[in-house]
Amino acid sequence: MVLLIVDTQKLITNKELYEFDMFVSNVKKIIQAARENSIEVIYVRHDDGAGNALTKGTDGFEIYEGFQPINDEKIFDKNVNSAFRETGLLEYLISKDEKDIIVAGLQTDYCIDATIKCGFEHGFNMIIPAYTNTTVNNKFMSAEQSYRYHNEHMWNGRYAECISLDETIERMKSSQKLVAFNR
């Protein structure tokens, strides 16, 4: 089991996001729970390329202050929506024989959606804790509608397990107990 934190970068982690305060609080909780239960935390950052606001080397590209990696937590950079495409993440997870991936981050209707579907296609059990992903309004639907559509309709039971934050944390604890038992 690993925790994948996707695109929680300074430029796009802001008050325009649906349920921003709850999102920040829940992501902090899930990161803390992962660390307390020896679940690896892996970060992914999106690079839009030279000349764009979300570009490697800019302050906005860096991970949001409240979610900063510690010690040797891995960071993979990407330039497409999926965290798995040409980043080395897929190969890394396969080499570690990981099966369960908890996903949190930004944005629900872009990189989180692509990462969940691609992870599913690669055979991973994708786990989505409630209110650990979010997005902004777009011209087709509000941020709330987009969040609810993906979390309550599109992913759950198809591509992922969309479960409560508390249930996710309990699974982390159980996973760690199982690892300790098997040693």
Image (cartoon, rainbow, N blue to C red):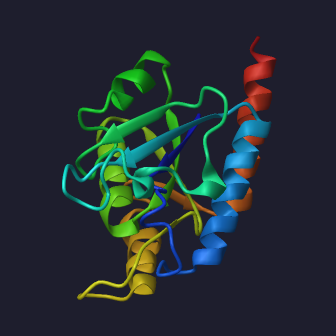
Judge by depth and name the residue closer to the eye, 35 or 55: 55
- Residue 108 image point, x, y percent: 40, 67
- Left/right of residue 179 with respect to residue 62 in the rendered view: right
Quarter of the figure with the C terminus: top right
- Left/right of residue 31 with respect to residue 36 in the rendered view: left
- x 21%, y 49%: residue: 49
Judge by depth and name the residue closer to the eye, 91 or 158: 91
As displayed, is residue 129 above or below residue 4? below
- Left/right of residue 172 with respect to residue 115 in the rendered view: right
- x 33%, y 68%: residue: 109
- Residue 159 image point, x, y percent: 38, 54
- x 45%, y 79%: residue: 148
Judge by depth and name the residue closer to the eye, 85 or 128: 85
Judge by depth and name the residue closer to the eye, 45 or 95: 45
- Residue 142 image point, x, y percent: 37, 88
Quarter of the figure with the N terminus: top right
What is the quadrant of residue 137 in the picture? bottom left
- x 25%, y 38%: residue: 85
- Residue 65 image point, x, y percent: 61, 56
As displayed, is residue 132 above or below residue 19? above
List the single residue furthest toward the top: 183
Instruction: Please state the total of marks drawn on the protein image.
Output: 0
